[in-house]
Image (tube, grey):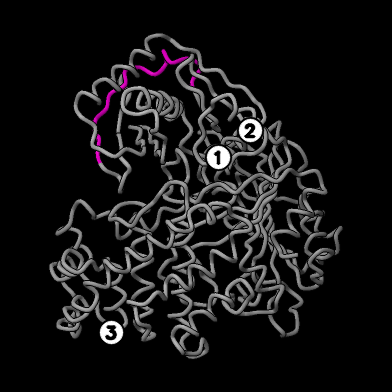
């Protein structure tokens, strides 16, 4: 039984209910491009909305973080990773959470307690020291010398943000054959963090004071890749059983050894794995120059460049061989990998063909100027003519000790000036944002828009993705043509007709199978548990959804479409606003 199975089995026996892993592309969350933490999909429930599965939850969650993308190539950074998590929504608290974490590590995974150390919240002028957590750890046999107190590192989300907050305790493992130090120092790199338990026990007021919450939550997270490497005694994550089969494929394709080509092989393995999961996601992301599509394009192209460094024939099916191994390894846990296998292979193949056509020419062009710093005009030329992401130009230049004028590049290419940094750093900050009154209205409006498109354009239309901010909604849907002005006007009029009719928004909880049989529509059916929330808006819309929603359509104001455009092949995008 592998780590994911052991973890789920352990917490299910303790009364937790396993919930499905959410897609890597989040629904209605404008703070990120991808789900970056196990708790992120649970934000509405941590804020108080009842979860249909109850108060004790457990899962493994697909996560993608690109803020450290340039670090990939070392022994432990990854863009895609899996998080194990268990939650208490107003149920158990510190004692049970800590004891269960400790017992899982020491009794299920057989880790000696002497190799464990922890950090706790030290206390400051905002909140008191977490003496309760310290005492629980000492009662379990963690000696005081292995308990380290900090302020900034042991408070979630951070000390400035208002809203739900609280102390956390991080669990470290001594990953070294050296003698275990008497005193724990978290800055000592031999100590590796493997688990974090967050205790949401306070509300941080706007005036800076905190108050104890009547209902407290627990959120925990453990990284699968890091913990697997620890259990297998590997200092290099890529030598663990999670990566070894992928690395062996790359060794066979390149006819080279991992020991002599670690960086390029790690980058290829990581980037193809992440590309597989993005391409298989129900959101239908395709390589492009915006948002998630830009990240996908950048990952594939960086993998191609390192395949070329390994002298792999980049016109061969090398990418398919690696992807097939990844699909085989993860299909047991993620059904979308089975359903979208052909989509994944097609995405990789098409982007490879597109990039291969210009890669040789682009490298020749780069070599003409490689002995100098790269100005903005040249960087833009490499991007515009040869499809070089700015990061690739920077990476090539850095390897030669030269710089790239990124500001100059951005001035030359204003419409994409956020891509090189912002798109890559869309990371979850930990705050429970994006769920305010205005966002709630927009969320409800997407249901009406979906229903109107079905009536006016085609009953075969389905939502492919959405993004909501406090200024507008963005709605992606499958459609084989650009909407005519008449279609847009009719859709807009129909949505406003429903808004003016003051239709009630009714929430029901039922079995998922009953919801589907009742005609309720659902995007990403796999992510929903067996008991679901169904929102009906009058007789015009019925969807499975996690909320939040208004109580009546009259609250929405006037609906107005401001733009309709192509999102990707076969997918259109509408941007709309609500006016008072």
x and y, in percent, of residue 424 in the image: 37, 58
Q: Which mark is residue 400?
A: 3
- What's the residue at 76%, 37% (across, down)? 91
Alpha carbon of mark 2 to alpha carbon of mark 1: how far? Answer: 9 Å
User: Residue 499, percent across and down?
Assistant: 38, 14
Q: Label 2, on which residue? A: 512
Q: Which mark is on residue 525?
A: 1
Which portion, as a residue range, is magenta?
550-565
| Mark drawn on residue 310 | none
Q: Secondary structure at mark 2?
A: helix
Question: Cα distance, mark 3 to mark 1?
Answer: 49 Å
Quarter of the figure that contains the C terminus: top left
Task: In this rendered view, identify the residue nearer to me: 327 or 29.
Answer: 327
* Up-down relation of residue 536 to residue 284 (above or below): above
> Which is more toward the observer, 469 or 113?
469
Q: Is residue 122 visible?
A: no
The total of numbered circles placed on residues is: 3
Q: Is residue 422 left or right of residue 427?
A: left
């Amino acid at each position: 039984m592998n780590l994911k199975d052991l973890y789920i089995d352990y917490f299910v026996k303790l009364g937790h209910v396993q919930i499905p892993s959410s897609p890597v592309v989040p629904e209605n969350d404008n703070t990120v491009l991808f789900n970056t933490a196990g708790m992120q999909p649970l934000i509405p429930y941590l804020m108080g909305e009842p979860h249909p599965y109850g108060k004790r939850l457990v899962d493994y969650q697909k996560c993608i973080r690109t803020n450290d993308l340039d670090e990939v190539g070392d022994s432990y950074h990854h863009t895609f990773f899996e998080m194990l998590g268990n939650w208490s929504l107003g149920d158990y608290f510190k004692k049970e959470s800590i004891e269960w974490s400790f017992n899982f590590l020491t009794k299920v995974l057989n880790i000696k307690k002497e190799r464990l150390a922890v950090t706790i919240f030290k206390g400051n002028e905002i909140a008191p020291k977490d003496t309760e957590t310290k005492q629980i750890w000492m009662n379990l046999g963690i000696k005081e010398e292995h308990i380290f107190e900090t302020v900034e590192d042991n408070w979630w989300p951070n000390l400035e943000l208002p809203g739900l907050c609280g102390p956390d305790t991080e669990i470290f493992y001594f990953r070294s054959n050296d003698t275990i130090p008497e005193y724990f120092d978290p800055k000592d790199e031999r100590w590796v963090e493997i688990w974090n338990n967050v205790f949401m026990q306070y509300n941080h007021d706007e005036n800076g004071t905190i108050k104890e919450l009547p209902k407290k939550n627990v959120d925990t997270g453990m990284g699968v890749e890091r913990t697997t490497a620890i259990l297998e005694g590997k200092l290099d994550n890529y030598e663990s059983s999670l990566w070894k089969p992928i690395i062996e494929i790359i060794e066979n394709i390149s006819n080279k050894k991992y020991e002599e080509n670690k960086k390029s092989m790690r980058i290829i393995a990581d980037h193809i794995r992440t590309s597989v999961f993005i391409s298989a996601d129900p959101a239908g992301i395709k390589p492009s120059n915006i948002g998630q599509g830009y990240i996908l394009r950048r990952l594939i192209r960086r993998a191609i460049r390192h395949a070329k460094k390994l002298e792999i024939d980049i016109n061969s099916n090398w990418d398919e061989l690696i992807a097939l191994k990844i699909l085989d390894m993860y299909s047991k846990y993620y059904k979308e990998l089975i359903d979208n296998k052909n989509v994944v292979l097609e995405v990789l193949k098409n982007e490879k063909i597109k990039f291969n056509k210009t890669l040789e020419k682009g490298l020749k062009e780069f070599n003409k100027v490689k002995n100098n710093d790269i100005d903005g005009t040249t960087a833009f030329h490499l991007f515009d003519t040869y499809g070089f992401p700015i990061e690739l130009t920077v990476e090539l230049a850095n390897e030669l000790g030269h710089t790239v004028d990124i500001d100059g590049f951005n001035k030359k290419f204003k419409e994409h000036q956020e891509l090189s940094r912002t798109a890559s750093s869309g990371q979850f900050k930990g705050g429970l944002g994006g769920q305010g009154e205005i966002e709630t209205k927009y969320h409800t409006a997407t249901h009406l828009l979906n229903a109107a498109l079905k009536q006016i354009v085609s009953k075969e239309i389905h939502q492919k993705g959405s993004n909501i901010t406090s200024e507008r909604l963005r709605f992606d849907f499958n459609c084989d043509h650009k909407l005519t002005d008449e279609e847009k006007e009719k859709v807009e009029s129909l949505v406003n007709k429903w808004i003016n009719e003051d239709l009630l928004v009714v929430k029901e909880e039922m079995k998922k199978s009953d919801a589907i049989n009742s005609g309720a529509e659902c995007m990403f059916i796999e992510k929903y548990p067996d008991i679901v929330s169904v929102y009906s808006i009058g007789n015009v819309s019925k969807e499975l959804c996690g909320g939040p929603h208004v109580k009546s359509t009259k609250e929405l104001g006037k609906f107005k479409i401001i733009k309709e455009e192509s999102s990707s092949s076969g997918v259109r995008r509408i941007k709309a606003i609500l006016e008072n």
